[in-house]
């Protein structure tokens, strides 16, 4: 049904008109990593991966209809310091994976596309994998696991006999865990202990093969220093969900990560991205107080000139299925369709006898 509606919007000119209406709005794209499937792999993760081929083909099509600008340029437009330019898009990567530079950056440089990378400085300094990557690796090694954990009075489980079942269970575990509004230090401790237990059961640790793994390894400080073409922002020290910390803890995460990025790059760190996209008014005001000029969320949508620079919306990277599908995602028409569907279903449920 969705594809039919998009095709209908395309042939009737509705999609083109909606795109024109949103020509002043800035589209910010959210990614994490890009994987070259032609290279030998240390292991195949349970989570889906964006291939280099899909990344390149989508960029080619986006570049036909949109103008790539830097995050610095976008924020100046949003603040009214520069005139808007139609159909602007910004490309951002969260966490700071090495493949951002080894795989994505060469393509972006050839296409003259600015790149923004939000670095999780503490994990980079400690050479420590993201908790989600550690868990992906060790959980996959287990044979027919059926495990239950408890986080802040919420039960979470990991199970599955086949890879498909494990992938589904792991996705559900991640989504449920991220929705639990416990203090982030409690969350981080839970993930550390859970990963230790899984690694002991599997007799396998990602950290042992991490530096050889193109999917999960993070950049190191020397690589950041050497690659001057990217704009580097902060993603906190410990990938902390800042809205679930107190004010002093938030400021410590914000200031320490900012200082680390500035020491590595010898440039001002102006931009921030909320880990897991979680934010509230307190964290927004503290981001500004810490000296950042912008903060990116994971809230889906576009950004109008004059909007709040500390609640910037983003869209997930649109993999090409068709030209009208990609344009619908880029201009926000897909979001409109999704919200219309949700509201319609809610109305139908309310009027049922």
Image: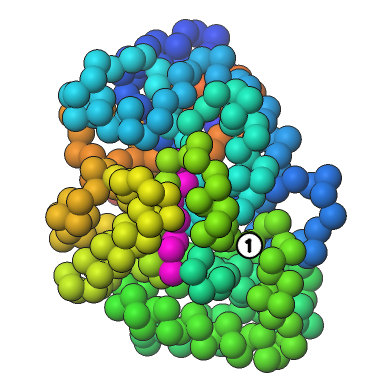
Q: Residue at x 55, y 24 (%)?
A: 112
Residue 151 picture quarter: bottom left
Q: Which residues are magenta?
A: 116-122
Between 146 and 220, the residue placed more toward the observer is: 220
Judge left or right: residue 329 versus residue 107. left
**240 part of magenta stretch:** no
The structure residue drawn at horizontal position 42% and vertical position 49%, both measured from the top left corner, is 265
Q: Is residue 119 one of those drawn in magenta?
A: yes
Which picture quadrant has residue 128?
A: bottom right
Which color scheme is applied? rainbow
Q: Residue at x 20, y 56 (%)?
A: 290
Residue 150, percent from left and from top: 46, 87
Query: Which of the two residues, 244 or 154, is positioned nearer the viewer here?
Result: 244
In this view of the protein, can residue 239 be seen by the observer? Answer: no
Q: Residue at x 58, y 82 (%)?
A: 195
- Residue 36: x and y, percent? 75, 45
Q: Is residue 228 placed above or below 219 in the rendered structure?
A: above
Choose between 44 and 222: the one closer to the eye: 222
Dot 1 crowding, Cα within 10 Å, few <14, some 14–19, many 20+: many
Whether residue 75 is visible to the viewer of this picture, yes or no, is yes
Residue 324's x, y, as percent? 56, 20
Q: Quadrant of the N terminus?
A: top right
**In the depicted view, which residue is nearer to us: 16 or 109?**
109
**Residue 61 position (above or below residue 202):** above
**Tally of numbered tags:** 1
Q: Is residue 14 above or below residue 238?
A: above
Dot 1: what SS?
Answer: loop
Which residue bears the numbered disc 1?
Answer: 217
């Amino acid at each position: 049904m969705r594809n039919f509606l998009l095709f209908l919007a395309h042939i009737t000119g509705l999609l083109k008109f909606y795109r024109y209406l949103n020509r002043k709005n800035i589209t910010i794209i959210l990614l994490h990593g890009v994987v070259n499937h032609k290279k030998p792999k240390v292991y195949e993760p349970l989570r889906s991966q964006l291939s280099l081929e899909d990344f390149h083909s989508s960029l080619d099509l986006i570049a036909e209809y949109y103008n790539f600008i830097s995050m610095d340029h976008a924020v100046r437009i949003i603040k009214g310091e520069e005139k808007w330019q139609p159909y602007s898009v910004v490309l951002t990567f969260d966490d700071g994976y090495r493949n951002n530079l080894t795989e994505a950056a060469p393509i972006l440089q050839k296409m003259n596309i600015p790149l923004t990378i939000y670095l999780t400085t503490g994990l980079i300094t400690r050479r420590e994998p993201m908790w989600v990557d550690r868990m992906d690796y060790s959980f996959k090694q287990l044979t027919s696991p059926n495990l239950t954990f408890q986080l802040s009075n919420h039960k979470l489980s990991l199970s599955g006999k086949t890879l498909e079942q494990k992938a589904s269970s792991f996705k559900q575990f991640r989504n449920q865990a991220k929705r639990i509004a416990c203090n982030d230090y409690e969350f981080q401790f839970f993930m550390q202990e859970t990963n230790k237990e899984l690694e002991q059961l599997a007799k396998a640790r990602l950290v042992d093969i991490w530096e050889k793994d193109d999917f999960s390894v993070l950049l190191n400080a020397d690589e950041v220093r050497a690659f001057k073409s990217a704009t580097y922002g902060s993603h906190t020290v410990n990938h902390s969900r800042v809205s679930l910390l107190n004010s002093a803890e938030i400021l410590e995460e914000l200031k320490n990560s900012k200082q680390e990025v500035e020491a590595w790059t010898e440039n001002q760190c102006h931009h921030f991205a909320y880990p897991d996209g979680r934010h509230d008014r307190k964290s927004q005001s503290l981001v500004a107080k810490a000296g950042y000029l912008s903060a990116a969320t994971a809230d889906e949508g576009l950004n109008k000139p004059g909007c709040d620079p500390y609640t910037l919306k983003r869209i997930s990277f649109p993999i090409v299925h068709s030209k009208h599908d990609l344009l619908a995602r880029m201009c926000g028409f897909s979001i409109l369709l999704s919200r219309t569907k949700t509201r319609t279903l809610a109305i139908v449920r309310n009027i049922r006898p």
